[in-house]
Amino acid sequence: MNLVKFTLFLLSAVVSASKPEEACKKVTPVNNCISFAVSGGTGCAWMCEYCANNLGTNNYYFTDGVCSYESGGCVGNPVAGKTYTCCSA
């Protein structure tokens, strides 16, 4: 499956899920990155956990900086339906 088809499949599965945890259970990173969209009410805490779990490391970053770690944990302001990408460092 080429990258465009895989990304579209992944995005449609995530966007169509009523809860983020109902999205694809098996994600395969492409070029050490994963892309996904979130539904309303999903915060950076979930996004950071999702990236860490699916990339297999806590050493990753968001390509647009939407989420970052501060003293209170993973924070930021994700927008529903927007595509986000995280990559292992």
Image (cartoon, helix red, strand yellow):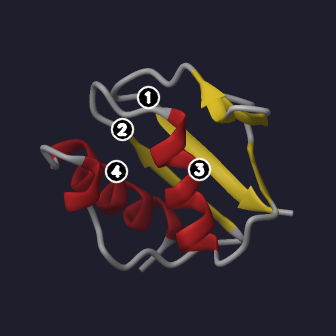
Residue beneath label 1, please? 82
Q: Nearer the viewer, mark 3 or mark 4?
A: 3
Residue 38: assigned label: 2
Q: Nearer the viewer, mark 2 or mark 1?
A: 2
In the image, residue 1 above or below residue 34: below
Residue type at mark 4: give it: Leu
Q: Could you say which quadrant of the image residue 1 lies in?
A: bottom left
Q: Nearer the viewer, mark 4 or mark 2?
A: 2
Quadrant (top left/top right/bottom left/bottom right) for the C terminus: bottom right
Mark 2 to mark 3: distance in Å?
12 Å
Left or right? Give the position of 63 relative to 7: right
Residue beneath label 3, please? 48
Point 34% across, 50% down: residue: 11
Secondary structure found at label 2 = loop
Residue 11: assigned label: 4
Point 30% across, 61% down: residue: 9
Residue type at mark 1: give it: Lys
Secondary structure found at label 4 = helix
Left or right? Give the position of 2 relative to 63: left
Mark 1 to mark 3: distance in Å?
16 Å
Nearest the eye: 44 or 36: 44
Residue type at mark 3: give it: Cys
Are circles 2 and 1 on residues that touch, CB within 8 Å? Answer: yes
Residue type at mark 2: give it: Val
Count numbered badges in the picture: 4
Are circles 4 and 2 on residues that touch, CB within 8 Å? Answer: no
Mark 4 to mark 1: distance in Å?
10 Å
Could you tell me residue 65's position as x and y percent?
A: 74, 31
Earlier residue among tags 1 and 3: 3
